[in-house]
Image (cartoon, rainbow, N blue to C red):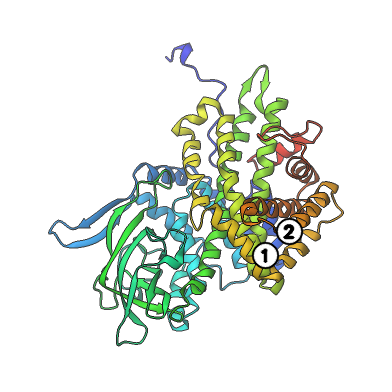
Amino acid sequence: MEARSHTVTNQAPPLVGYDVFTCDRALSEAVARHLPAELLDGVREELRGLGRAAGSEQVREWGELANAFPPRLRTHDRYGRRIDEVDFHPSWHRLLGKAVAAGLTDAWGRPGGHVRRAAGFLVATQAEAGHGCPVSMTHAAVPALRAEPELAAVWEPLAASRVYERGLRPAAGKAGVLLGMGLTEKQGGSDLRAVATSARPLAEDGAYLLTGHKWFCSAPMSDAFLVLARAPGGPTCFLVPRVLDDGSRNAFALQRLKDKLGNRSNASAEVEFDGTTWARRVGEEGRGLRTVMGMVAATRLDCVLGSAALMRQAVAQAVHHASYRAAFGGLLADKPLMRNVLADLAVESEAATVLGMRLAAAYDSGTERDLALLRIAVPAAKYWVTKRCVPVVAEALECLGGNGYVEESGLPRLLRESPLNSVWEGAGNVQALDVLRALRTEPAALDAYLREVGEARGADPRLDRAIRGLLAELADLDGVEARARRLAERLAVVLQGALLVRWAPPEVADAFCAGRLGGEAGSAFGTLPHTLDLRAVVERARPVE
């Protein structure tokens, strides 16, 4: 018989056994908004299946195990032969299998592909974020591959496959592949023009041998990698397979795995090319930076979506906890101050989701205006949304009190993961400078942006004032580089406000405009005006069907 002092009361049940997609109203509404009506029923059914899996106890356990038992590098086999392989916990492979089977590497060739894939990425990332890295890179590699149609004809169908096949074998013998990238070098970092890896052409047309060292190469057990190297004609993009067509291993030496703050389930390696590493040119010599930019833009949007997913899961956990936990004579969620905190977090989460999904829809539409919008909105969104992720997750953790600081809650893993997307694919300064570059060189990008926010003009005076203030900032370009971060932030926040005013419930848009555009809130979460309908905002964020 259990001692009375050991009876557990006033603890929230675990947030498992629910449909992550259906319970996310902002996400499910975005899917309905951006997809053609004839696709909607089928896509909803797909996403509900993925949502039920992501919210299941089994898949959550896979995420825990994949992080508790991180990848392990094996440079040699038992006989001393060089193999350069990474061993993963079986749960990693199960997560990847789910993601690939759900079509998360298949966006470019199907109707509504980017919206349905972005929604799936948001859902799957809430169960475990690390496996999203190879999924993201495989998806993003397609635009670069299309610079070389012969290569794309072979590799694109394999990248878009719904079959995940682990193990290193020639790509021709596999039903599906994963693709990675190796751009960053220790002397260059985000400055891709500083690439020092060299490429020597062979007699075979388009074939080269590479010599160099890549400082960050994520998912090193992928089947091939898009790599930047300096050819005689300048920086050039190459496809480097792990296994050659004859079944022999390419020279691809894994020197070590990075010991990272978060993202523990995913392997990030340093890679050496020894002068015999075979590669196939992708695009023209000297045009490598242009070739990879489509890939970089797609991975940057995934950084936005990944951060939105982390925020949503953190907010769902906080609201769920507060809806069950009682203190000071009532449920935490009913306490005015806690309600203010939860509503503020929920508004930030919804703004990130709505923005990310709008950008995915822009890829699908393919109109000149939407493609121009992406050129300025993707770096601005990547700059701002990924930076908001850390304080959102940290505040959500605090909502659980000491329980949130314990590993079993899952919040510490989310917190360790939260800075990642701000760092990868170009940190904050790189994104802010890219915004400036778009403003200076592509007038159509700013025009598309102003048309987009202009759709909401007249609906909220705070938004209208914010648009006017932004226009004043854009008109004054003195010392603009030093103000690039502020400008990127204002572009992102004004765009979020415009989208919420158009599409979110009035209580959500009102709270966002008050706290982010109207100057009616403090610097910390939980400082929204008390006169807002915060109860409705919190109720909307509750993870219940």
Neighbourhood count class around disc 2 (C-alpha, 10 Å): few under 14, some 14–19, many 20 upward: some
At 25% from the left and 78% from the top, the residue drawn is 246
Q: Residue furthest left?
A: 79
At 48% from the left and 12% from the top, the residue drawn is 4
Residue 49 shows in the view: no
Residue 118 shows in the view: yes
Q: Residue furthest top?
A: 4
Neighbourhood count class around disc 1 (C-alpha, 10 Å): few under 14, some 14–19, many 20 upward: some
Q: Are marks 2 and 1 in contact (CB under 8 Å)?
A: yes
Q: Which dot marks residue 474?
A: 2
Q: Which dot marks residue 79?
A: none
Give the quarter of the figure containing the N terminus.
top left
Query: Residue 134 sits in which quadrant?
Result: bottom left
The residue lying toward the viewer, choosing from 199 and 79, is 199
Q: Where residue 338 sits in the image (x, y, percent)?
A: 67, 28
The residue lying toward the viewer, choosing from 209 and 196, is 196
Q: Secondary structure at mark 2?
A: helix
The residue beneath circle 1 is: 439
Q: Is residue 163 left or right of residue 125?
A: left
At 49% from the left and 79% from the top, the residue drawn is 147
Q: Is residue 181 left or right of residue 436?
A: left
Q: Where residue 227 sits in the image (x, y, percent)?
A: 40, 69
The residue lying toward the viewer, choosing from 315 and 200, is 200
- N-terminal of the two: label 2 or label 1? 1
Q: CA separation, marks 2 and 1?
A: 9 Å
Q: Is residue 314 left or right of residue 256?
A: right
Identity, as a three-letter code, of the amino acid under mark 2: Leu
